[in-house]
């Protein structure tokens, strides 16, 4: 007995087409053709060609989640609205590779009397036996993805353990004809990389190396992981730090230096990478290939960078820091959007908010600064708030939140509250009276950083 009934034919038939990567779309042509031929099957089941909708917006998207799969999400929405009579896919794994998305579709199909068809047959999710078969197929589809990943992961780790897994190389190193790693034959590229290590030995600071290169107007070679071409760019702190912290320049083969973490941001699951400590690397083979420095020198450089490092001022997060500037970690520059660092000057320790991060990272000019009041409020006046691109209301709410955490009562916000005079503002903005730092005990923010 056919499961296709007249009420199903009165609605549309949806053909879902998907391949996991764009490489599969380009190379696995036969698979794509088989999926598009499901249109003819829908017509053979009784639907008119005009009533068959092809959903192929998810080509090149993985089925492990619904994020970014607008086609699948639209299909599920139309099923819930009762517009779909049957959903056709060449196999269950094309629709979903995780049970959460798969069972959501099954539940909606059961409620709205919608059929599901694959290459094996036609199923009605409202029937117990059909639901059992579809559930098993969904579970096997999800397990298949896990098995494939584990197999590929195991092969990669085994090959990496022997130092034979080919990894992207930064500018300054490349593969020869036999697949071995060698130093770049381009003398300009090799000299630029060697200069970074030489300057770091002299200056003991990555930021000072950046300033020296900028002063000498020297460029650095860079290569993107997906690009073989070397491009010359202005020296930045990140570029220098990447060179100093990459063990491949020390002749070591390292695999598994990063970990992928999942975070939920605004209701969306996103993946982020973090650097793992050297003890947690999967593979580290010393003297694997020629390097610019020895591995012992590389380890000494890491200790030097670590000794230079200190937590960014004003970005401590939870607990309030010491000092009278109650907006530390909250106030941002109205020009570039970076967090402003706080420092104190004078005998009365007047707070001063400065945007110096661009100068530290890229050697650019300082963006701007503003002095706080010399009174007990330690709060920039409305003129300074406007200069920083802030609204007084938002500043007040942030300040009151900090005050509540500190356990002190906020000062009066009435129009009679004392504000700094123009002379006081000018005095607090004088370069001679300014010192950048997060507290009297901290040193200047202009000092060397890692």
Image (cartoon, rainbow, N blue to C red):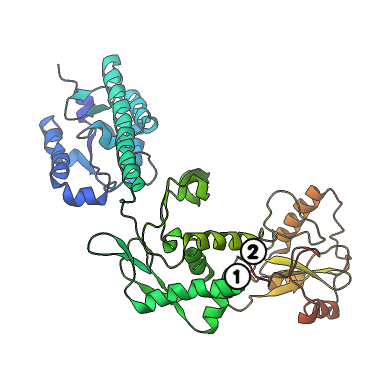
* Quadrant placement of the N terminus: top left
Compared across the picture, whether 339 is left or right of 293 comes to right
Q: CA distance from mark 1 to mark 2?
A: 9 Å
The residue drawn where x is 23% and y is 42% is: 17
The secondary element bearing badge 1 is classed as loop
First along the sequence among labels 1 and 2? 1
In the rendered image of this protein, does residue 403 appear above or below residue 158?
A: below
* Quadrant placement of the C terminus: bottom right
Spot occupied by residue 128 in the image (x, y as percentages of width and height): 30, 15
Spot occupied by residue 148 in the image (x, y as percentages of width and height): 29, 36
In the rendered image of this protein, does residue 383 appear above or below residue 69?
A: below
Spot occupied by residue 419 in the image (x, y as percentages of width and height): 85, 70
Q: Mark on residue 308?
A: 2
Quick one: label 1, few (<14), some, or many (20+) residues within 10 Å?
A: some
Residue in front for this viewpoint, 1 or 28: 28
Compared across the picture, whether 136 is left or right of 204 comes to left
Question: In which quadrant of the rendered view does residue 151 lie?
Answer: top left
Residue in front for this viewpoint, 100 or 449: 449
Q: Are marks 1 and 2 in contact (CB under 8 Å)?
A: yes
Note whether residue 82 is visible: no
Residue position marked by numbered label 1 in the rendering: 204
Question: In which quadrant of the rendered view does residue 292 lie?
Answer: bottom left
């Amino acid at each position: 007995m056919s499961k296709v009934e007249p009420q199903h034919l009165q609605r549309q038939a949806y053909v879902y087409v998907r391949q996991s990567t764009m490489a599969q779309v380009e190379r696995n042509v036969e698979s794509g053709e088989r999926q598009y031929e499901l249109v003819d099957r829908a017509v053979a089941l009784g639907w008119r060609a005009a009533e068959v909708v092809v959903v192929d917006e998810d080509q090149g998207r993985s089925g492990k989640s619904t994020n970014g799969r607008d086609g699948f999400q639209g299909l599920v929405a139309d099923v819930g609205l009762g517009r779909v009579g049957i959903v056709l896919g060449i196999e269950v794994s094309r629709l979903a590779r995780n049970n959460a998305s798969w069972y959501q579709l099954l539940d909606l199909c059961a409620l709205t009397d919608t059929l599901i068809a694959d290459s094996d047959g036609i199923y009605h999710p409202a029937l117990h036996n059909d639901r059992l078969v579809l559930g098993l197929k969904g579970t096997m589809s999800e397990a298949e993805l896990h098995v494939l990943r584990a197999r590929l992961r195991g092969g990669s780790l085994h090959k990496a353990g022997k130092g034979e897994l080919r990894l992207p190389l930064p500018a300054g190193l490349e593969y020869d004809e036999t697949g071995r790693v060698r130093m770049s034959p381009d003398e300009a590229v090799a000299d630029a990389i060697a200069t970074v290590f030489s300057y770091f030995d002299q200056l003991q600071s990555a930021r000072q190396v950046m300033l020296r290169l900028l002063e000498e107007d020297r460029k650095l070679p860079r290569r993107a992981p997906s690009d073989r071409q070397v491009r010359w760019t202005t020296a930045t702190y990140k570029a220098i730090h990447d060179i100093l912290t990459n063990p491949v320049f020390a002749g070591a083969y390292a695999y598994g230096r990063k970990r992928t973490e999942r975070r939920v941001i605004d209701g969306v699951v996103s993946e982020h990478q973090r650097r793992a400590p050297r003890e947690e690397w999967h593979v580290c083979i010393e003297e694997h290939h020629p390097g610019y420095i020895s591995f012992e020198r590389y380890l000494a450089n890491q200790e030097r960078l670590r000794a230079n490092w200190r937590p960014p001022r004003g970005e401590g997060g939870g607990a309030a820091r010491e000092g009278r500037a109650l907006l530390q970690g909250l106030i941002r520059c109205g020009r570039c959007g970076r967090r402003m660092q706080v420092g104190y000057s004078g005998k009365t320790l007047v707070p001063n908010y400065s945007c110096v991060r661009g100068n530290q990272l890229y050697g650019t000019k300082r963006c701007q600064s503003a002095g706080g009041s010399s009174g007990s409020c330690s709060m920039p006046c409305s003129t300074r708030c406007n200069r920083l691109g802030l609204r007084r209301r938002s500043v007040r709410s942030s300040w009151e939140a900090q005050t509540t955490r500190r356990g002190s009562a906020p000062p009066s916000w009435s129009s009679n509250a004392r504000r700094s005079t123009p002379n006081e503002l000018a005095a607090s903005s004088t370069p001679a009276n300014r010192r950048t730092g997060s507290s009297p005990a901290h040193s200047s923010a202009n000092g060397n950083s890692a």
